[in-house]
Amino acid sequence: MKARLYKKYVEEVVPALKARHQYANPHLIPRMTKIVVNMGVSASLEKTAVEDAAKDLAQITGRKPVINKSRHNVSNFKLREGQAIGCRVTLRGDAMYEFFDRLVATALPRVRDFRGLSTRSFDGRGNYSLGLADQTIFPEIDLDKIKRQQGMDVTIVTTASDDAQAHDLLKLMGMPFAENR
């Protein structure tokens, strides 16, 4: 069974984008390709910090995260080569649409003093990145079991050729952008 947001994309978003931009080819209509969720952990924290972050990320996304390790020694940061410094998950297909739906419908409204997302976070090629300061905005996380607050970065990769098309796609998918930011 397809995700609810995928049905919305096919039935509502595609015709709206086609009418707005007059695409000659249906393959030119932008779509989401993948969502990458990344949690970086300070190397100065205790050794279980990366494992705790990976456990939280697995609960949020429903996928097992990949542990990122440092490539070089950096003495100023007390960092050694091969030391675990974060974790990430790449979501595609139905898992991507389910995560996007939970992000837009439940997690972002739980952000304190939320007034919408900035429209300046596009990269010029149709991809959007946002940073979340706390993992507890997701309802999957049990507040009693977390040891530390951990932020995360969410990158939404689209097939849009420019930022205006990607903005239209994400706006029609339900992303709450601020009007005058």
Image (cartoon, rainbow, N blue to C red):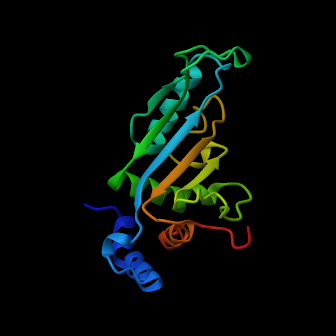
Judged left or right of residue 177, residue 106 is left
Q: Which residue is nearer to you in this view: 30 or 151? A: 30
* Residue 162 percent coordinates (x, y): 52, 66
Q: From the image, which quarter does the C terminus lie in?
A: bottom right
Q: Which residue is nearer to you in this view: 57 or 118? A: 118
Outermost residue, left direction? 1
Judged left or right of residue 175, residue 21 is left
Query: Which picture quadrant has residue 133?
Result: top right
Q: Residue at x 60, y 49 (%)?
A: 137
Q: Does 26 appear above or below 78?
A: below
* Residue 177 percent coordinates (x, y): 63, 67
Q: Which residue is nearer to you in this view: 19 or 85? A: 19
Q: Residue at x 33, y 55 (%)?
A: 94
Q: Residue at x 40, y 53 (%)?
A: 96
Q: From the image, which quarter does the N terminus lie in?
A: bottom left
Judged left or right of residue 64, residue 51 is right
* Residue 78 percent coordinates (x, y): 69, 15
Judged left or right of residue 12, residue 117 is right
* Residue 68 percent coordinates (x, y): 50, 27
Q: Residue at x 55, y 69 (%)?
A: 167
How many numbered discs, if any? 0
Q: Does 133 appear above or below 15?
A: above
